[in-house]
Amino acid sequence: MENTNRKQQKMNLKDMLDRAVAAHQAGQFNEARTRYEKLLDCDPENPDALYLLGGIYYQNKNPRSAAELITRAIQSAPDRDYFYNHLGLALNSMGNFDDAVDAFHSALAVNPQNPETYNMMGKVLRGKGKTDKAIDAFRRAIDLDPEYIDAYHNLGRVFLKQNQPEEAISVFKQLLEIKPDLVETRNRLGKALLFQNRIPEAIGAFKECIETDPENSHAYQNLGAAFELAGKQHEADNAFQKAIVFSGDSAEARHRYGNYLLARKRMAEAIGEFEKAIETKPDFAEAYNSLGIALKSEGRIKEAIEAYKKAIEIDPKHPQTYNNIAVALNAAGKNQEAFEAYGKAISLEPNNPHVFQNIGILLKTQGKLQEALIAFEQAASLMPEYADAYHNMGSTLMELGHMDKALSAFQKTAKLDSGNHSARYMAAVLSGKNPKSAPPEYVKELFNQYSNRFDRHLTRNLAYKTPQLLRKALDDSIGKHKKYEKVLDLGCGTGLAGEIFRDISGHMTGVDISQDMIEVAENKALYNQLHVSEINEFLSECREKFDLVIAADVFVYLGDLEPLFSNLEKRLNPGACFIFSTESYPEDGYTLQFTGRFAHGSGYIKSLGEKYHFKIDNVNPVVLRKENDKSVEGEIFVLLKAG
């Protein structure tokens, strides 16, 4: 009778387990958990119930309870390798990396031929930066199971993360030789080829994916990225649009397309896509973050801050959002709030060099140069190849008067980033070289970065009033009520001079080397024509003649002014005015200062005027602006073209 009861009890327990497992497999997790708990009330050490209940807790992001339950399961059944595997995952989620690896080794002690153990251990090792050991684990998984798709994908992924695309390509091709119809693998191959800038091959791989699976949204998404890099904007747009369609108009596809538009500076369209993504998925924190980036790029700082706040409300543990909102708060002049946001970003991600870089920029704008330098040095120590950190170190060291150290920092920047024209130029300046002008690439780079904050920084931070000083000098020389039919604003920037001279101008043309500055000027609707060009190139190609030419704070980037005077002689009507500012130089000629800006002697200007038939009508010594709380001395010139 007793044996019969025991047999019946076992059958009941098995039935309870079967019912719990069925609910579990059907996704009815609450019911499954209740059934596992009832079974454990009857059989507290049932290894299957303990293990599976632990799995539910792990899925519900409660790794501690999961680890406790799976540990009890192991005590009841120590010979099941998969128990140890999932204990390893739970321990890793708790931050117990070493214990997690020990759990995987325990699994291998039970079954050294389980490829899944090696694959799981590889993912944990990869997540902790143990790249070489992760690669070994994934390779071992593939050796044990040559058709283990996930292990191939993980191995390729770690090679890409290590900037080894050729090895990743080899791994994906190896798998495709075994299983040629794997669309996801061919998609990954295309991404690896794209990473290596083998764009035509990548496009081919993505097209093969689409031939096999014509509605694969991920393949269309990647094809769009490949077309973008190939400079085929129309094809890229079509691919991204198809990705949206075949994803069922998913928020994720809208978001990815928005990021593509953002990268191409199509801000209005990007903002529209991010807003559609949020409409579809209101808790999409990443889309709010991207929306904030786009809004800030448009100068809509308040709206950007609100978007970032919403992203943080949804996901308060994303460090990049705190970094982004700090940048926006800084732009809004809310420095203390910016520091608090940077502090939160560091608490979440202590080794992020970009946050320290941004903290340094904020400190530098506040004049806290020594503290800023420490922040830039911290950024460089965390990321030794971080060219921008060395560049900021260089400019800060210059302001601190440490010219030799600044030179070393700029040379390091140029070595790390050969395309950084500013660093190369400043290294030349500090090396004692005296070029005839600043390289156009340097000027373009400088003002493209500066465009969104140019007006506010000059007028508020630097007490910049050069356009007003030019207008006063012109009025004093010629009279306040004279009108000028054709006006040319050289180096017009965002239009600060245009605002001052618009009322006495008929047709006003602006020229600047920076596309971003021109876009800001265009929004002010001051100019009849705007041109993106180096000013001497513009003058040599221009066929119009002008009655007034303005150059506010332009010659600081041009040392040798003779080509400019030669060009202007041909482009000014008789009696026309040429007004401009220079930084003071007590000798004849010109010199390149340690600031990277040129200063010109009044004798040099006079000799050029005589040579090219200009009469100096007025020269006024002035304070052009403030720099590090010191006055920058200069002159305002009014020249008249001989009749």
Image: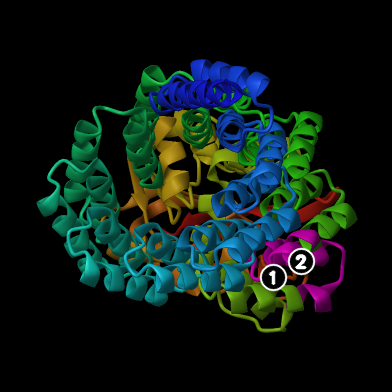
Q: Toward the viewer: 288 or 165?
A: 165
Q: Residue at x 67, y 46 (%)?
A: 74
Image-based side of 93 in relation to 640, left or right:
right
114, 8: nearer the viewer = 8
Residue 402 rendering spot, x and y as whole percentages: 86, 71
Going by the numbered disc 2, the residue's amino acid type is Ser
The boundaries of the magenta stretch are: 378-407
Q: Secondary structure at mark 1?
A: loop
Residue under label 2, please give it. 381
CB of mark 2 within 8 Å of CB of mark 1? yes
User: How many numbered dots are placed on residues in this image?
Assistant: 2
Identity of the residue drawn at 82% across and 79% down:
404
Residue 568 in the image: x percent, y percent?
A: 41, 62
Residue underneath mark 1? 384
Location of residue 244 by image quarter:
top left
Local secondary structure at mark 2: helix
Q: Callout 1 environment at 10 Å: few (<14), some (14 to 19), or many (20+)? A: some
